[in-house]
Image (cartoon, helix red, strand yellow):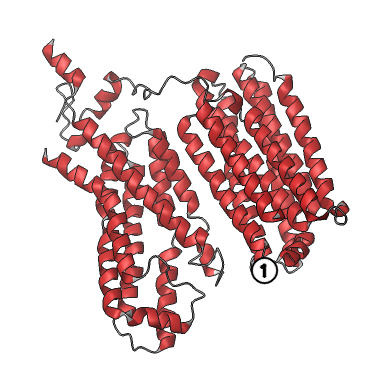
């Protein structure tokens, strides 16, 4: 059925986000070692001086992060099924999910813009880089609300549309974002924007979110596409 | 893909048709078949992903803390001595006591002794309040002595670790109050087992995390 | 399991209180001199993670949990304890 195909495609968008975004970042040089708040002006300017590679990689990564939108949509469909007539949590997930997509897109576009004129004044480059990274790392609220909404909906769902452990994983992921605003306070160390408990932790747990939700939904879609046994039996009697 | 027995409701989107009816006719999903294993999982399996994941996160921060300490053990030692160790120790005892009360409350609830369980949970909440109060005093005292999260690596970790832990205490207290409400409504054990055990397990996690933090941040660093 | 709290649990609680006091004493500077950083710190860490082990076993009731869960918890306790001792003493 076409709807099921679209649902499945949207579920696959979750893991696809991780893959495409990572590829883009690898090309751009954001991975494996991103610029840090402790990087010198020379290091920052030198990073953006490879403008073609940086722009190409970042553009790919913006396409990558935009793949969260289909996933958010299919999560919403399933949350509506869980909640029924008053799908408040589904709406909450939808809105905050949309916000997360924008929160991911804009900083990357800003970074691409920095690479647009590599011969800019170094202070400007540094400032724009600060803005891009801090905007990328710190807005935790939309993400956390989205995860909590999903978790609560799953745990309150008597029909176990999605496995309960996925709800708990969402809570854990939400929790992992809490330290991120600390990036505003530290210019170096494990709680700076490149710190292990900020960038790397959030990158890991958000990737886990995308992959877990994508695969879980794919499984749920497949299972609901199976012919309904009880309906068949009822029709047969 | 509509079921023959689904109620077609033109007011609802198609994927909600029969959702009310389905709730009536279809029993809740059978528990997913698990391998027959000896043993009872307190709460439910999914919760332990959260608990162990949370513990791992704290462990990672503690390990990095100890790693960073190696580059400056003397500064860490001096900084650790600025902490009021007795408060940390008393807080440890307070949380251990609260955990004990929670265990007793679990048994009381299991045995149907709701009033006793309520008193015990209230006791645990009281302990949490004492913990929070002592922590607030500790923070106040540290900050007014000029120590903030940005005055050095030790205090960064101190505030982040104890701050994250305090958040857990707050969440745990809210959960204890939820349990309290369930006890007030005299919910039977069979109806509440998973939730009550889950809340209890979460609280024990809060306790054990503090033991680790107290030991490594207050004691070991100061040695 | 309708009875009162088993004595085992109360014994563990008492043990935890005693262990806390012991580690507090160990860490309160009385062992600054002498046996060097290693012994006191190692002992403190070992006692602390033993406490955590018992909180898991008897408070969280993991002793009657499926072996996989018990193992995961114990691995955490062991790994973190070993790492802590290694980072502090070595």
Residue at the spot 28% in from the left edge and 35% down from the top edge: A81
The answer to whether residue A14 is above or below residue B69 is above
Q: Residues within 10 Å of mark 1 (few under 14, many from 20)?
A: few
In this rendering, position of residue B198 left or right of residue A114 = right
Q: Which residue is mark 1?
A: B152
Classify the position of the N terminus of chain B by image quarter. Answer: top left
Residue at the spot 67% in from the left edge and 62% down from the top edge: B70
User: Which x, y percent locates residue C25?
Assistant: 84, 46
In this rendering, position of residue A167 left or right of residue B145 = left
Most extreme residue toward the front is C90
Q: Nearer the viewer, residue A33 or B29?
A: A33
User: Which x, y percent locates residue C85?
Assistant: 68, 49
The answer to whether residue B149 is above or below residue B211 is below
Residue at the spot 59% in from the left edge and 49% down from the top edge: B59
Q: Nearer the viewer, residue C71 or A107?
A: C71
In this rendering, position of residue B162 left or right of residue A29 = right
The quadrant in which residue B4 appears is top left
Classify the position of the C terminus of chain B by image quarter. Answer: bottom right
What is the chain letter for disc 1?
A: B
Most extreme residue toward the top is A237
Q: Is residue B118 visible?
A: no
User: Which x, y percent locates residue A220?
Assistant: 27, 35
The quadrant in which residue C88 appears is bottom right
User: Which x, y percent locates residue A73?
Assistant: 26, 48
Q: Is residue C29 visible?
A: yes
The answer to whether residue B110 is above or below residue A208 is above
Q: Nearer the viewer, residue B195 or A176?
A: A176
The quadrant in which residue B143 appears is bottom right
């Amino acid at each position: 059925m076409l709807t099921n195909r679209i649902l499945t495609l949207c579920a696959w968008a979750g893991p696809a986000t991780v893959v495409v975004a990572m590829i883009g970042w690898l090309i751009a040089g954001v991975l494996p070692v991103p610029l840090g708040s402790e990087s010198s002006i020379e290091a920052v300017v030198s990073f953006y001086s490879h403008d073609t590679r940086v722009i190409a990689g970042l553009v790919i990564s913006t396409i990558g992060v935009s793949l969260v939108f289909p996933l958010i949509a299919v999560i919403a469909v399933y949350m509506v099924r869980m909640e029924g007539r008053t799908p408040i949590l589904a709406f909450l997930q939808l809105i905050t999910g949309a916000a997360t997509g924008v929160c991911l897109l804009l900083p990357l576009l800003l970074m691409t813009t920095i690479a647009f004129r590599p011969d800019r004044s170094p202070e400007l480059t540094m400032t724009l880089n600060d803005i891009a990274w801090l905007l990328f790392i710190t807005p935790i609220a939309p993400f956390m609300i989205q995860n909590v909404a999903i978790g609560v909906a799953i745990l309150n769902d008597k029909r176990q549309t999605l496995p309960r452990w996925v709800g708990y994983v969402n809570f854990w992921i939400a929790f992992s974002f809490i330290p991120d605003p600390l990036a505003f306070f530290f210019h170096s160390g494990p709680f700076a924007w490149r710190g292990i408990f900020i960038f790397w932790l959030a990158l890991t747990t958000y990737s886990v979110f995308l992959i877990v939700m994508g695969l879980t939904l794919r499984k749920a879609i497949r299972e609901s596409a199976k012919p309904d046994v009880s309906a068949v039996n009822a029709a047969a009697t | 893909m509509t079921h023959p027995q689904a109620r077609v409701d033109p007011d609802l989107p198609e994927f909600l048709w029969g959702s009310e009816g389905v709730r009536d006719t279809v029993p809740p999903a059978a528990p997913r078949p698990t391998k027959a294993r000896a043993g009872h999982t307190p709460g439910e399996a999914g919760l332990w992903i959260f608990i162990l994941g949370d513990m791992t996160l704290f462990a990672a921060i503690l390990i990095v803390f100890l790693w960073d300490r190696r580059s400056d053990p003397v500064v860490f030692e001096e900084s650790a001595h600025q902490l009021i160790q007795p408060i940390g120790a008393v807080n440890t005892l307070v949380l251990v006591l609260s955990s004990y009360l929670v265990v007793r409350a679990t048994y009381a609830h299991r045995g149907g002794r709701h009033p006793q369980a309520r008193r015990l949970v209230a006791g645990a909440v009281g302990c949490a309040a004492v913990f929070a109060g002592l922590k607030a005093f500790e923070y106040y005292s540290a900050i007014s002595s000029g120590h903030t999260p940005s005055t050095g690596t030790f205090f960064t970790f101190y505030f982040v670790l104890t701050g994250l832990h305090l958040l857990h205490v707050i969440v745990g207290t809210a959960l204890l109050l939820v349990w309290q409400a369930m006890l007030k409504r005299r919910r039977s054990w069979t109806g509440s087992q998973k939730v009550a055990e889950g809340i209890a397990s979460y609280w024990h996690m809060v306790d054990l995390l503090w033991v680790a933090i107290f030991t490594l941040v207050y004691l070991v660093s100061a040695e | 399991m309708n009875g009162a709290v088993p004595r085992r649990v109360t014994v563990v609680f008492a043990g935890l209180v005693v262990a806390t006091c012991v580690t507090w004493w160990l860490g309160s500077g009385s062992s600054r001199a002498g046996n060097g950083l290693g012994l006191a710190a190692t002992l403190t860490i070992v006692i602390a993670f033993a406490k955590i082990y018992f909180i898991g076993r008897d408070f969280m009731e993991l002793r009657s949990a499926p072996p996989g869960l018990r193992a995961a918890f114990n691995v955490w306790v062991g790994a973190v304890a070993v790492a802590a001792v290694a980072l502090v003493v070595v």
